[in-house]
Image (spheres, rainbow, N blue to C red):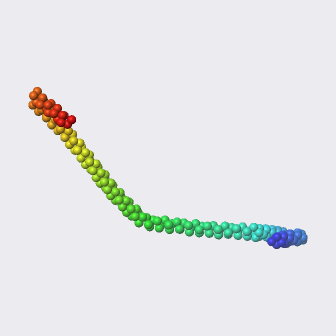
């Protein structure tokens, strides 16, 4: 590439030298300038071509590679987004069934909890009734014992009153004599 640019530069300078040796009596002074314009254009085009070939090829190759990589990355992102969208669509499609299942589960749990509460309440009520029955029986027994004691005291008091009302000095002497005789028999 450098050789081509060097050759173009050499040709351009040679043409300039040939043009400079043209006789002074040339017909048109603009004609010499026209050749220089073409020579300048050829040098400029050659330099630009050289730069385009030397720097443009790798630039465009790397740019093409970046674009391909960007397309590949975008395709992967699109596939990922499509997969996510499909998952969301699947979940939304199953949402109604999931909600029904949740409702059924919650209603079953509520029914089970209500039944368990009923059973616990019935068991607690039976325990309370049993305890109350035992307390009533115990209180009735204690009341009977108290009533028997009271009746016994009343009977003793009544008997004592009757005995005192019938007791006189003669009956007391007879009782003491009987008591002493019974002691002698036993001794």
Residue drawn where x is 44% and y is 67% of the image:
93
- Of the pair 77 and 16, the residue shown nearer to us: 77
Of residue 153 and residue 123, the one placed in the foreground of this image is 153
Image coordinates of residue 116 in percent, x first then y, are 34, 57
Please, is residue 132 above or below residue 15 in the view?
A: above
- Which quarter of the picture shows residue 49? bottom right
Pinpoint residue 52: horizontal percent, then vertical percent.
75, 69
In the image, taking residue 84 as reference, residue 119 lies left or right, namely left
Q: Nearer the viewer, residue 32 or 145?
A: 145
**Where on the picture, by quarter, is residue 119?**
bottom left
Q: Quadrant of residue 17?
A: bottom right
| Residue drawn at the location 17% of the way across and 35% of the way down | 182
x%, y% of residue 178? 14, 33
* Residue at image location 11% in from the left, 31% down from the top: 174
Q: Position of residue 19 (x, y in %)?
A: 87, 70
Q: Is residue 31 visible?
A: no
């Amino acid at each position: 590439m450098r050789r081509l640019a060097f050759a173009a530069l050499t040709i351009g300078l040679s043409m300039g030298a040939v043009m400079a040796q043209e006789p002074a009596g040339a017909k048109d002074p603009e004609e010499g300038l026209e050749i220089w314009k073409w020579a300048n254009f050829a040098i400029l085009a050659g330099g630009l071509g050289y730069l385009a070939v030397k720097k443009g090829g790798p630039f465009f190759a790397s740019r093409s590679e970046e674009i391909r990589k960007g397309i590949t990355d975008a395709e992967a992102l699109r596939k990922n987004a499509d997969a996510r969208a499909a998952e969301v669509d699947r979940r939304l499609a199953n949402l109604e069934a999931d909600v029904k299942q949740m409702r059924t589960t919650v209603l079953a749990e509520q029914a089970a909890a209500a039944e368990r509460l009923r059973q616990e309440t019935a068991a607690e009520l039976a325990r309370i009734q049993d305890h109350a029955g035992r307390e009533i029986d115990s209180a009735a027994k204690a009341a009977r014992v108290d009533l028997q004691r009271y009746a016994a005291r009343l009977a003793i008091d009544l008997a004592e009153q009757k005995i005192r009302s019938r007791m006189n000095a003669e009956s007391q002497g007879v009782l003491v004599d009987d008591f002493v005789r019974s002691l002698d028999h036993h001794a």
